[in-house]
Image (cartoon, coloured by chain):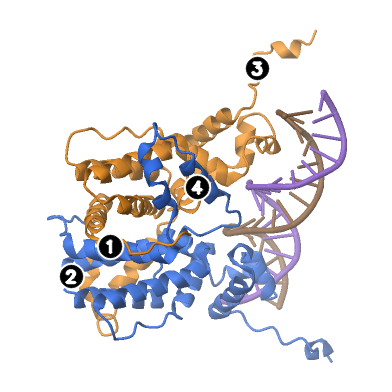
Chain colours: A blue, B orange, C brown, D purple
Amino acid sequence: MAPESRRERPAKPALTRDGIVAAAVAILREEGLRKLTMRRLAQELDTGAASLYVYVRNTAELHAAILDELLGTIAPPPAEGSWRDRLERLLTAYTTRLLEYPGLALSALVARPSGENYLGLVENLLALLAEGGVPAERRAWGIDILLQHATSTAAEHAEQDSPDDWDALARAVRDADETTHPQIAAHAADLLTGRPEQRMSWGLQVLITGITHTGLPPERNPT
Amino acid sequence: MAPESRRERPAKPALTRDGIVAAAVAILREEGLRKLTMRRLAQELDTGAASLYVYVRNTAELHAAILDELLGTIAPPPAEGSWRDRLERLLTAYTTRLLEYPGLALSALVARPSGENYLGLVENLLALLAEGGVPAERRAWGIDILLQHATSTAAEHAEQDSPDDWDALARAVRDADETTHPQIAAHAADLLTGRPEQRMSWGLQVLITGITHTGLPPERNPT
DNA sequence: ACCTGAACACCGTTCAAGT
DNA sequence: ACCTGAACACCGTTCAAGT
């Protein structure tokens, strides 16, 4: 009896948090963040959206879990090269990962992640600053700016379904009146030039140099 | 005849782009960005949501227009103080404005604004870097990082309906294992300490110092 | 040209009821 | 405890039809 249970369709696997996150990553890779909704995810797992809420508090938490999963695939920086080189490579790898799904970077910016792989990244960054001789009390705030920069650089590329926005700025800069906006007119070329990797690399150099040269305020009150 | 047109209700004003943006700003101030939807905005203007699309391409464009409106209320920096002081004050004023509506900062990060007031801000920033002796070819990229930092600092505070996220990171940092995460354990205090204004101020110092000390890559290819 | 109602194609989240 | 269907309370955007 009960021949239905012997159909070709594979047995419906039990729901688990890991299974949910894995399915979410799969949808993300195949269809993008826009399509990754609770309803679509539930459909993929052959259940109702409500069932997901047993394992995941809300969409933000789901995004955080996915991000941490993705962070797990960042290769640790090789031991060769100066600490600055390795620091830049590690942060670039982080940004590159995020650039595959800029919408996730946006989530990461708003809800700071706290998963195992994110903590590992923080750990590595702190160690690199220590190796570079950055004073201990400056390291935590230092990686904070570095990560904020790396994350927001990726987030800027979110939702580029229509590149109208960039065109709008480019047009405004090009059409800038020389008398009302002399600076913009003079710098028009540089405002619109530079490959993303070049700007990213320069930005990291700026930050690292700034961090090594800028002392903390004398008193740092708790939040 | 037609006594309906003489009712106490004020005559429905004609739709204009400016009127739409003004109504949007009003809703933003009174109810927040979450409540500012095309449907709610149309309701406020006593029309249907579809009518708005005659004047505004989509939600992103509406957000950009609102942001530029808000930017108009930033006081120009006073002429007193060093260029660094004035630069920091101007950027802080920008971030403070954005912090009132962090959701807008998120929009600004994704769709770079191009309104008149935003261009004015860019113009002022370029002039300040010029005054500070920053080489011409470095100024455009310099204000780009400064604005990215200022905008993303505000964006980080978006959607804090539930402060669970910060708690999650704080817990993870405090619970960090000393053997697996020695750096995090050692820096736990600094990772969680510091008033936002202090971190913001230090961040700007880092950027300004970095910009004045870091040359551009020799070749900068067009985008 | 401008404006509209209605429709299209969706959302996240909650909750009472089942197993 | 886990799972579900159905409901609640919404979205942005398009479009044919009107004025």
State the separation of the CA atoms marked 4 and 3.
41 Å
User: Mark 3 belongs to which amino acid?
Assistant: Ala
**Residue B36 seen by the camera:** no
**Residues under numbered marks 4 and 3 in contact, where contact means CB atoms less than 8 Å apart:** no
Label 1 CA crowd tier, 10 Å (few <14, some 14–19, many 20+): many
What residue sits 69% from the left and 71% below the top? A43
Number of the label disc, if any, that sits on residue A134: 2
State the image coordinates of residue B88 (x, y, percent, origin top left). 25, 45
Output the chain of dot 2: A
Q: Which amino acid does label 2 sit on?
A: Val
Separation of marks 1 and 3 at Cα, in angstroms: 56 Å
Seen in the image, is B119 located left or right of residue B24? Answer: left
For disc 3, the chain is B
List the residue tagged with mark 4.
A170
- Residue B52 to residue A144: above or below: above
Dot 4 or dot 1, earlier in sequence: 4
Q: Which residue has dot 3 on it?
A: B11
